[in-house]
Amino acid sequence: MEFDFYDTEAAHLAECYDGDEADFEEYSTEDKRDYIAEKERRFKKRDIGKFVVVQTARRNKRVMCRLYLVNRNITRRFWWSHDAQYAMVFNDKTAAEFQAKKYKYNNAKVVEIKEWMTS
């Protein structure tokens, strides 16, 4: 039995790859806009070690599992948001706990901002 290279998986993969990397497209303006919008939804590096009030979402738990208490000085359209740019950030844990006690539904609790939550 003779080995035939062209019947192997490597041969078929070599046919699929033409070796030309110049075909890659640059990011579109929509992709750049979406990337910037996603970075804005994250906390800043200076917020590490501060506190936020969070609650579990009532619906769409797989899409938005965590909601942040909204800073009403930024917007008055809603009370809870999944965007960190609207979140009310507390320097003191006791102030955040006092605010969290006001909300008895959906397990409102205080969370410290960690590095993985930042952009």
Image (spheres, rainbow, N blue to C red):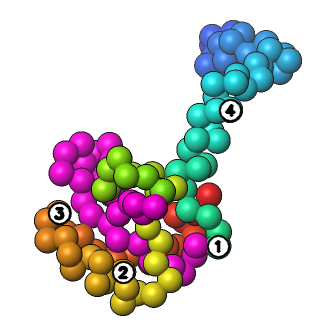
Viewer-closest of 72 and 7: 72
What is the three-letter code of the residue carrying label 3? Asn
Residue at x 65% of width, y 69% of height: 45
Crowding near the residue tagged with mark 1, few <14, some 14–19, many ≥20 C-alpha atoms within 10 Å: few
Q: Secondary structure at mark 4?
A: helix
Where does label 4 land, which residue? 32
**Where 16 sits versus 57, above or below?**
above
The span from disc 3 to disc 2 (Cα, nearest Å) is 16 Å
In this orientation, does residue 23 appear?
yes
Q: Position of residue 82 (x, y in %)?
A: 39, 52
Crowding near the residue tagged with mark 3, few <14, some 14–19, many ≥20 C-alpha atoms within 10 Å: few
Where does label 1 land, which residue? 46
Q: Earlier in the sequence, mark 3 or mark 4?
A: 4
Numbered circles on residues, count: 4
Q: Left or right: where does residue 11 sit relative to residue 101?
A: right
Image-quadrant location for residue 7: top right
What is the three-letter code of the residue carrying label 1? Arg
Crowding near the residue tagged with mark 4, few <14, some 14–19, many ≥20 C-alpha atoms within 10 Å: few
Q: Magenta residues? A: 47-73
Where does label 2 land, which residue? 96
Where does label 3 land, which residue? 106
The span from disc 2 to disc 1 (Cα, nearest Å) is 18 Å
Q: Secondary structure at mark 1?
A: helix
Q: Position of residue 68 (x, y in %)?
A: 37, 61
Q: Earlier in the sequence, mark 4 or mark 2?
A: 4
Residue 68 lies in the magenta stretch = yes
The span from disc 4 to disc 1 (Cα, nearest Å) is 24 Å
Residue at x 52% of width, y 51% of height: 41
**Where 53 sits versus 61, above or below?**
below
Q: Earlier in the sequence, mark 2 or mark 1?
A: 1
What is the three-letter code of the residue carrying label 4? Lys
